[in-house]
Image: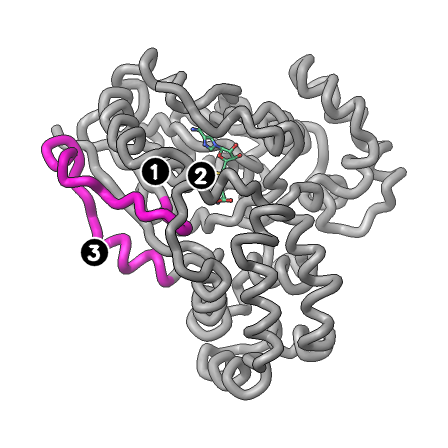
Amino acid sequence: MRSEIRVQPVFQRILYSQSWEDPLVDLAALEIGPQDDVLAIAASGDNVLGLLTANPRSMTGIDFSLTQICLVELKMAGFKALSYDELLGFLGVDPLTAAERRALYPRLRPHLSETARGYWDGEPGLIGRGVIHIGRFENYFRIFRSYVLPLVHDRGTINRFLALESLEEQRHFYDNIWNSAVWRGLFKVFFGKTLLGKLGRDPAFFKYVDVASVGATFLERARHCFCGIPVRSNAFAEYILRGNYASRDRLPLYLEERHFELLRDNVDRVRLVNDAIEGLLPDCDGAFSKFYLSDIFEWMSAEAYEELLRAFVKAGRPGGKMVYRNLLVPREHPSAVDDLLENDPARAAELLPTERSFVWGRLEIETIKG
Ligand SMILES: C[S@@+](CC[C@H](N)C(=O)[O-])C[C@H]1O[C@@H](n2cnc3c(N)ncnc32)[C@H](O)[C@@H]1O
């Protein structure tokens, strides 16, 4: 099995500097405990660390993009080398200057592999910006916030939305203040296939997408963010609209202060692997009990998806669980694997509407049969 997409040049740079998947959904779906050995897509590292808050026995983070692995290493080194307040400043949540961030970097450096050290030594500019802000995808949100959103709503209106206390207020606000024709029109163009493919993701990510209007699909999902998810606890919405996290009450899970000591103490349990997951699995019979898989199946054919599901079963244990998402491509439990995997659509239907990163279309939760 070979990964067909990893050769794209877009993976030479950091694509995701934060996670756009809600780890509370994955924690609820996977029910991770101290007996678990977890295999997780590494990406920005946020969810490797988010799932580590459940204290599994081991955590393997894997990504075929070396730059993503370097980013995860840097975040992990931040937990080991810095205090909580320093970490928030270094990563870019709190307002340090570029020089102050660069001055902290030598303390993280000894905790990095030679490869990651080589990468970050050569990127002082990225460190100065705060590394949660440097992904191509985060940059796309920055363009949205800087050039598109101001044409629709001013800062005061955005702040009013972010301060709303109830879903009833949110629905009223969306229908009467936010949801203008200009909002709908600009949103559909900006988050449509062409611009998003060129500037925020990569056109290759759309190879298997067959959706009439990508922009209209995301507009509908954005409506759910405004009307169906309490904004007071939605760090994803705050980052998209404001470009950072203004208070300690609305932070990504792995950056909440209550988890800092546990993560600092447990971060050594994380093993990072720079490979396609398809490459790792054949050597891992029975090695894992829980799998967090992002939406990796969207970037491969339906046949490769089914083949890979079988490889996960072999690398997993009876009773083990896996969770994955669909963004725009239907990758739903194929009946051909009914003898191997038990799908739980009821639990998925319960959890998906609570997903604070509202962009997702489907959630699949599977249990490996005995
Ligand atoms: C699947 S992507 C998230 C994509 C995002 N939701 C989107 O659709 O634009 C998350 C991470 O998975 C990694 N990835 C994707 N497919 C992989 C595979 N087969 N093996 C290892 N890593 C993979 C990517 O490099 C990326 O850092």
Q: Mark 3 points at which residue?
A: 346
Decide which of tag 1 and tag 3 comes sooner along the chain. Answer: 1
Q: Which of 303 and 316 is in front in this view?
A: 303
Decide which of tag 1 and tag 2 comes sooner along the chain. Answer: 1
Instruction: Give the SS element for disc 3.
Output: helix
How far is the residue under mark 1 from the one under mark 3? 19 Å
Q: Nearer the viewer, residue 13 or 25?
A: 13
Q: Mark 2 points at which residue?
A: 51
Instruction: Give the SS element for disc 1.
Output: loop
Q: Mark 1 points at which residue?
A: 32
How far is the residue under mark 3 from the one under mark 2? 22 Å
Could you tell me if the residues under marks 1 and 3 are in contact, i.e. CB atoms within 8 Å?
A: no
Amino acid type at mark 2: Leu
Q: Is 350 included in the stretch rendered in magenta?
A: yes
Picture quadrant where residue 239 is located = bottom right
Amino acid type at mark 1: Ile
Which residue is painted at 38% across and 51% down in the image?
210
Which residue is painted at 50% across and 84% down in the image?
175
Bounds of the magenta segment: 325-353
Amino acid type at mark 3: Ala
Could you tell me if the residues under marks 3 and 2 are in contact, i.e. CB atoms within 8 Å?
A: no
Q: Which mark is residue 126?
A: none
